Amino acid sequence: MQQNIKRSFAVLAVGAIATMLPVYGHHGTGVSYDASHPITMKGVVTEFHYANPHPQLYFDVTDDKGNVVHWGGEFYPNPAQLIQGGWGKRRSEAALPVGMHITITVSPSRAGTPVGAILKLLNDQGEVVMGVAGGVPGQPPPPEPPAGEQKQPEQK
Amino acid sequence: MMRITLVNLSVLLGAYLVCSSSALAQGGRGILAADPKNANRPYDKHDISGIWSRNGSPGGYGGGGTCRDCGDRGFSNDVPALTPLGQKMFDANKPSYGRNLGSADAAKHPEEAVGRRRAVPPASGSDPYQTCNPMGPSRALIYPDPLEMNVLSDKILQQFEWGNGVRTIWTDGRELPKDPDIPRWWGYSIGKWDGDTFVVTTTGADERTWVDHYGYPHSADMLLEERYRRTSYDVVELTMTITDPKIYTAPWKSETKKFRKLSKEGIKTVDGWAGLMEDICAPADDVDFFNKRIRDPAGGVVH
């Protein structure tokens, strides 16, 4: 099923972003994701939930044949960590309204379900949202390093 | 392994600087390094009050792993042999931390205790923390988020940021209960000074809690000793020993865990409200929402 997901959507490998992100997952879900095979998709926001243990973004992805798959993604930073970077609830919600077109990179579920841990998130202007990509909030992300071995962010 | 190139190094350094400057802009204290201005700052070795954190994030209070030199999130890699009952309880616990069970990564690290090499997706795990149950004393102390020590005349209240947990350590001279009628999630704890070391002993901790996030068990008869030493203005060190002959064939001593001091003002919401975050594990968010819609589907369990 994992292969089906990859075939269904534009899949782009990204480099070892996770190795330099100052963000971490918790609640043990890191084991559920395949950090060595990140995928990048274009989607439309359907719902955003800013809460413990990790904020979640729900979005629709449409493939070349018009099939829509509803995805869920969890942010590795939790609210306490996002707050340290200035991404409080109101600012985050304002940045991710329903209908926003996004480009998102996730570590996908090992089970092949449309769920992932968000590694990078760009809005329709190409700006980093919620600091997810190691860049300055609201600015383009730093250049990606060459593809290499992925390291699972440390679990909280 | 990722090849180290100048490009990689420059990207890594750039990302680090960006993150550090972002944290400083928000008033973070920079817990990754001791503050040089405190190097010779006087302190009272018998004062362990205030906010202490093992968190490694730039501000020291949100998300992620432990701070540099603070010790990891396991009790200790040097685990005594388990008794038959201990082995049975250990096998029943299915943690989601450490190296993935059955993975090549796990196989490459035989030097690590088996508890650190058996992580399963939480959707098929049994971690009580996943459903907002209290972590119990040893696991909560190892957890990387801040802890506030409120020192009162007859007790110390340890308030743990994650879960908003509160544990009482009585300092009024009472003895531990010999055979408590009912276990408690945080156990029964007393504390007293032994020279410059604050010694806490605990018994009667509910055996549903784990020693650490690797799923090591304990019985309600466990005697947990914590020894706190303030070694500088910025640092409190903690070592723990578990004596639990029902579960372990010998006392189990922890590695040294370090806490770094945070000021109240070092923890702020985006609109400036200082002090510990209200980092509650609320079933309405964690269980009914996150677990059902993200955690479980990620592990192949779709509700």
Image (spheres, grey):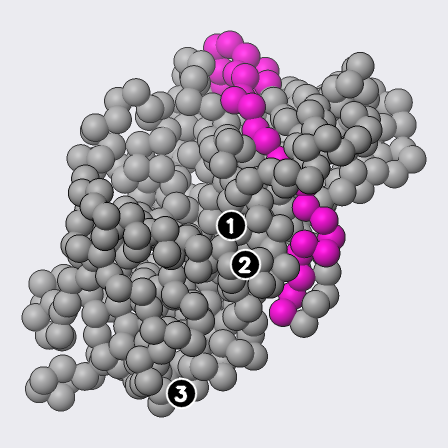
Residue A102 at x, y percent in the picture: 30, 80
The span shown in magenta is B241-270
Task: Identify the residue at horizontal 53%, vertical 78% (top origin).
Answer: A91
Which residue is rendered at x = 49% and y = 15% of the image?
B248
| Quarter of the picture holding the N terminus of chain A | bottom left
Judging by the rendered image, the residue that carries numbered circle 3 is A98
Position of B64 compared to A20: left or right?
right
Contact (Cβ within 8 Å) of mark 1 with mark 2: yes
Chain label for disc 2: B
Distance from Cα at disc 2 to Cα at disc 3: 29 Å
Query: Is residue B182 something one can see in this rendering?
Result: no
SS state under label 3: loop
Q: CA distance from mark 1 to mark 2?
A: 9 Å
Chain for numbered disc 3: A
- Quadrant of the rendered image containing residue B223: top right
The residue drawn where x is 43% and y is 86% is A97
Tell me, for residue B23, which label it has, or none. Answer: 2
Nearest-to-viewer mark from 2 and 3: 2
Q: Residues within 10 Å of mark 1 (few under 14, many from 20)?
A: many
Q: Amino acid at mark 3?
A: Val
Q: Which residue is mark 1?
A: B57
Q: Is residue A79 above or below residue B54?
A: below
Residue A154 falls in image quadrant: top left
Nearer the observer, disc 1 or disc 2? Answer: 2
What is the three-letter code of the residue carrying label 2? Ala
* Secondary structure type for disc 2: helix
Q: Residue at x 59, y 31 (%)?
A: B258
Name the foreground residue: B263 vs B216.
B263
Count of marks overlaid on the render: 3
Q: Residues within 10 Å of mark 3 (few under 14, many from 20)?
A: some
Tell me the distance, in whole angstroms, between the alpha carbons under discs 1 and 3: 30 Å
